[in-house]
Image (tube, rainbow, N blue to C red):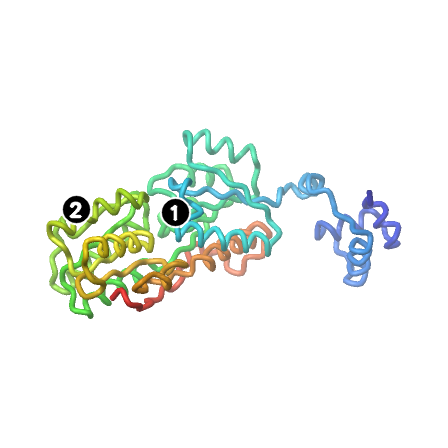
């Protein structure tokens, strides 16, 4: 097996110089020498021991990912799958490994598990409002990146990235109002999540701005279970059907399309539907789903790169802790 001493001997430099090349310091190495050492490592197919490097650098080159309470559906949920795809891409670009942690057990158990694994930083996707874990991790100095929390964890010092939920919701609701709909039902996700709460609040605000009151039968609290959500919607449509539905995400919107068809109603003539995500299926259902596009993959990549810049001391604007990506209304056949 090729060792660091073999690389040093073939390069005509000391073992320490090879180590400086591998670890980008602590002492500078001239570009010419660095190129020579790297060329030898490639020629000899030398791969430094990851454990040894982590001991020297006091870093594991690992990012922990904590997903919310939908772990069983994380690979099929449009939002989580899209953000995770971006996280994987960003981690690959920045040479980080990814390890998953779940929100099972007590907060103390989760925190202990994370601290035992010693990731360089932790990424959280759509944590519930009031979750103590971000504050606990921030208190012990673990760098944090949070996606989908609308900036509610500012006291932790975490880097936070989200789509502009206020603008996205306004685009969706005003699109339905422009189509002449005044009886709009909002299918909302789990109330404990910040983005869900913001979308409901903005939905109600926009309706009031247009002189339209919001009654209880125009809000439908849903779950991540498509079967139970379909039953809830079918019951609502049977009694006081709306002329349009604003769904808090594409998964709910796709459920709505299915239920509307099963009840023999036409889309969009009888009931129009707008989603939020623009996931892979939105353009391929019949009719195509009008939705709010949020760049989920780009958000995932951005949170990894931002946290990596912070860990490596290269973040161009370390004072900026909350970033919003712009949403886009994508009009298709469902409206």
Residue drawn at the location 46% of the way across and 29% of the way down: 109
Drawn side of residue 74 relative to residue 42, left or right: left
Q: Visible in this render: residue 32? A: yes
Drawn side of residue 234 relative to residue 100, left or right: left
Front residue of this view, candidates 199 and 229: 229
x and y percentages locating residue 270 in the rendered image: 17, 62
Front residue of this view, candidates 229 and 301: 229
Q: Secondary structure at mark 1?
A: loop
Q: Residue 76 bears which disc, if any?
A: none
| Front disc: 1 or 2 | 2
Q: Residue 235 bears which disc, if any?
A: 2
Within-10-Å neighbours for mark 1: few <14, some 14–19, many 20+: many
x and y percentages locating residue 185 in the rendered image: 19, 55
Which of the image's four quarters has the N terminus? top right
Q: Visible in this render: residue 157? A: no
Look at the numbered discs 1 and 2 and tell me whether their residues touch, using CB distance below 8 Å: no
Vertical position of residue 95 compared to residue 210: above or below: above
Mark sitting earlier along the chain (1/2): 1
x and y percentages locating residue 141 in the rendered image: 51, 40
Residue drawn at the location 33% of the way across and 67% of the way down: 330
Alpha carbon distance from label 1 to label 2: 29 Å
Residue drawn at the location 67% of the way across and 41% of the way down: 54
List the residue tagged with mark 1.
126
């Amino acid at each position: 097996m090729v060792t660091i001493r073999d690389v040093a001997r073939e390069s005509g430099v000391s073992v320490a110089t090879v180590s400086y090349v591998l670890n980008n310091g602590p002492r500078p190495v001239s570009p010419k020498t660095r190129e020579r050492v790297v060329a030898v490592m490639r020629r000899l197919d030398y791969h430094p021991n990851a454990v040894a490097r982590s001991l020297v650098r006091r870093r594991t080159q690992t990012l922990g990912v904590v997903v919310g309470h939908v772990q069983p559906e994380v690979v099929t949920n449009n939002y989580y799958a899209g953000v995770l795809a971006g996280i994987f891409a960003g981690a690959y670009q920045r040479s980080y490994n990814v390890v998953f942690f779940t929100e099972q057990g007590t907060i103390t158990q989760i925190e202990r598990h994370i601290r035992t694994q010693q990731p360089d930083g932790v990424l959280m996707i759509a944590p519930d409002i009031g979750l103590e874990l971000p504050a606990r991790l921030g208190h012990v100095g673990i760098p944090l990146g949070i996606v989908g929390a609308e900036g509610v964890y500012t006291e932790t010092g975490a880097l936070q990235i989200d789509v502009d939920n206020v603008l996205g919701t306004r685009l969706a609701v005003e699109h339905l109002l422009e189509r002449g709909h005044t009886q709009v039902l909002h299918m909302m996700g789990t109330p404990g999540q910040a983005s869900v709460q913001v979308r409901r609040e903005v939905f109600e605000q926009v309706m009031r701005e247009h002189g339209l009151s919001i009654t209880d039968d125009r809000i439908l609290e849903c779950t991540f279970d498509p079967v139970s959500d379909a039953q809830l919607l079918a019951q609502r449509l049977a009694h006081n059907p709306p002329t349009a539905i604003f769904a808090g995400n594409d998964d709910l919107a796709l459920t709505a399309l299915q239920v509307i068809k099963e009840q023999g109603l036409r889309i969009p003539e009888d009931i129009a539907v707008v989603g939020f995500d623009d996931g892979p299926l939105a353009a391929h259902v019949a009719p195509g789903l009008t939705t709010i596009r949020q760049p989920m993959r780009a958000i995932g990549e951005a949170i990894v790169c931002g946290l990596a810049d912070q860990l490596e001391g290269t973040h161009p604007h370390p004072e900026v802790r909350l970033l919003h990506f712009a949403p886009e209304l994508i009009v298709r056949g469902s409206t």
